[in-house]
Image (cartoon, rainbow, N blue to C red):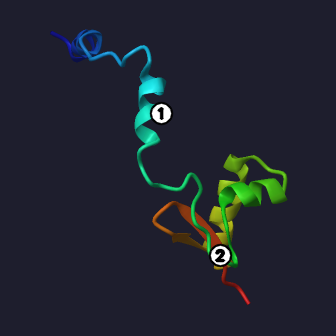
Amino acid sequence: MPAHKKAVSSAKNAPRPPVDLWDKLDKHRSNIDVPERPIVPPGGFTREEYSRKYKVSEKQAYYQLRKLRQRGVVELCSSGTGAYYRFVAS
């Protein structure tokens, strides 16, 4: 059987998610102890905050922050609950 036909055939046999997938997932998410937002130390900021401050989309914020990282202006950090940035240029 050609590879493309096999892929289509296996896709038909793939397990389907339950109709109430999101309700079920919500129930389980409520039982985990993880903050909804990253814990950002003083002097740090999230991509979402950057996006709001400069009135750009999150995609554009990502691009701009990537360029600022490459130039050594900001640093990408991880808090265990998500990513944040901090200003490192002088």
Q: Judge whether 66 appears above or below 44 on screen.
A: above
- Secondary structure found at label 2: strand
Which residue: 70% across, 49% down?
Answer: 58
The one nearer the camera, 43 or 71, is 43
Quadrant including the C terminus: bottom right
Q: Is residue 90 left or right of residue 10?
A: right
- The percent coordinates of residue 84 (x first, y second) are 60, 66
Q: Amino acid at mark 2?
A: Arg
Question: Is residue 55 shown left or right of residue 14?
Answer: right
Residue drawn at point x = 61 percent, y = 69 percent: 40
* Residue carrying label 1: 26
Mark 2 nearby-residue class (10 Å; few <14, some 14–19, many ≥20): some
Please state the horizontal and vertical placement of residue 18, each as a whole percent of the image: 37, 17
> Callout 1: few (<14), some (14-19), or many (20+) C-alpha neighbours within 10 Å?
few
Q: What residue sits right under mark 2 in the picture?
A: 86
Viewer-side residue, 4 vs 22: 22
Q: Residue furthest front?
A: 31
* Mark in front: 2 vs 1: 1
Mark with earlier residue (2, 1): 1
Q: CA distance from mark 2 to mark 1?
A: 32 Å
Secondary element type, mark 1: helix
